Amino acid sequence: MTRVNIAQPDITLMLDNDGVIRGASLSNGMEAEGFDDWLGRPWAETVGEVGGDRVRRMLDDARRNGVSAFRQVTQRFPSGLEMPVEYTTVRLGGAAGLLAVGKNLQAVAELQARLIAAQQAREQDYWKLREIETRSRLLFDASSEAVLLVRADTLKIVEANPAAIRALGMAPGWEFLREVAPRDQEALQNMLQRARKHGRVPGILIHVGADQAPWVVRASMMTAEPGLVFLLQLGHVGAPLPAPAPGSGIPLDELMDRLPDAFLVLDPQGGIRRANQAFLNLVQVTTESSIIGEKLGRWLSQPGAAASMLFAQLQQHGSIRLFSTQLTGDLGAEAEVEISAAGLAEAGGPFIAMVIRDISRRLPMHDVQDRLRAALGAVAERIGKTPLPLMVRDTAEVVERHCIETALRLTQGKRTAAAEMLGLSRQSLYAKLERYGIDDAPEGAREATG
């Protein structure tokens, strides 16, 4: 069969009913790869080891239902190039065989790496702020002085540290001024007015509480979530505050095993040193001892999200958060997951801690696939009435619409993120939204600000 150059999709395979490749076409950007060595070979032999099972599932689905679900495989070209491709397969009917339509995901994988790098930069800034906040919180809680955060407009207590709660018996929501002796209230108000003007003022002596005990109070002006607040530091003039009681040991191993999310401890090469029960359930193994020393990459199956990318990002940034990929269990169960991980501060530290969360339930894609099957079924009904190149073009349009709707769902309607995921400019995405009439996509897919 002669080669046909078609702009879209990236790869089109014409198969017989047994899944043997009888013809193929590549997009203009891939035509240099060639495909002559594919002809006459089963499609399952031209993909990676894991992809062979997926190809057979697609072929079975297409023969039975007319169209298969989308599945991602690693397509091997005669030149030796391996490329992540997302395929769907359509039954043409009768002796016409099957049609496999594929989308190149290599650009998506590269874009994912860039998005992860940008996300890590934002995450580093975020965690720096969190670190400052945590240190401030630790100082706030560990201070032996009574410390209160009081709203500047109402003088209601917003927060009180443990020392203040023990010594003063005050709690958030109380009006601090009512706890001050009447003879000292005017002096306190004058001090707070000076704090508004200068930001920080020297302390004064006031009497606080039911026993009218003497305290030295210092005030500073701060900006916080409820608005302007006063930071009040109270030093007891009498006996020192009691020290907090020491805590007891924490059973970390037992807590880790009870986590609903998978938890792992890995060596720098990705070998498993410790795994909790949630991870064993996720990868469908029975005992922890059977996977000790195994590489995590054994279960990572989504093209473009290989273990090498995960560990490269982790080595570069020291930690990684919400890395999306797919796990395949030993018995074939697939799960969409998000991975967060951190190693030691030094590059190449001896251990890596990793949390893996199953997010399959967050992605209600069955309804999208049902609509896709219905749309492709309508295209298949035109077989014999429409030339094959036009059929391929129409099928590609259905696939393209599906990819756009899926990207909008995965990004919760954020058009900019969806465009980056699809490897499109925002203008191109807007044009396709208008072309397919999905400017007002259902279930919050439209991003109000663009």
Image (cartoon, rainbow, N blue to C red):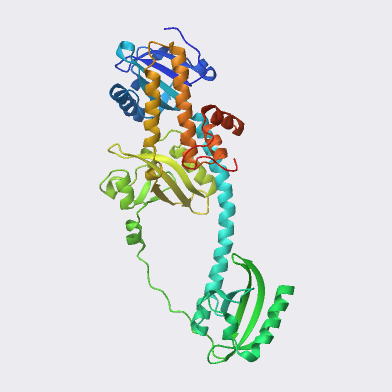
Nearer the observer, 259 or 421? 421
Instruction: Report the side of 318 relative to 359 (left or right).
Output: right
Q: How many marks?
A: 0
* Extreme residue toward the right, this view: 197
Q: Using the rendered view, name the quadrant where residue 296 is placed.
A: top left
Note whether residue 80 is visible. no
Instruction: Report the side of 290 relative to 409 (left or right).
Output: left
Q: Residue 192: give x, y in percent of width and height.
A: 68, 78
In the rendered view of the protein, which quadrant contains the C terminus? Answer: top right
- Vertically, is 245 above or below 423? below
In the rendered view of the protein, which quadrant contains the N terminus? Answer: top left
Q: Residue 75: give x, y in percent of width and height.
A: 42, 24
Nearer the observer, 432 or 378? 378
Q: Residue 214: give x, y in percent of width and height.
A: 60, 90
Note whether residue 110 is visible. yes
Instruction: Name the residue at 44% across, 24% down.
Output: 102
Instruction: Name the residue at 43% across, 76% down.
Output: 246
- Vertically, is 447 above or below 264? above
- Vertically, is 248 above or below 379? below
Instruction: Name the residue at 50% across, 20% down.
Output: 8
Q: Residue 73: give x, y in percent of width and height.
A: 40, 28
Q: Using the rendered view, name the quadrant where residue 127 is placed.
A: bottom right
Instruction: Report the side of 247 relative to 447 (left or right).
Output: left
Nearer the observer, 295 or 69? 69
* Extreme residue toward the top, this view: 2
Instruction: Name the residue at 47% across, 51% down.
Output: 342
- Vertically, is 150 above or below 400? below
Q: Using the rendered view, name the quadrant where residue 18 is placed.
A: top left
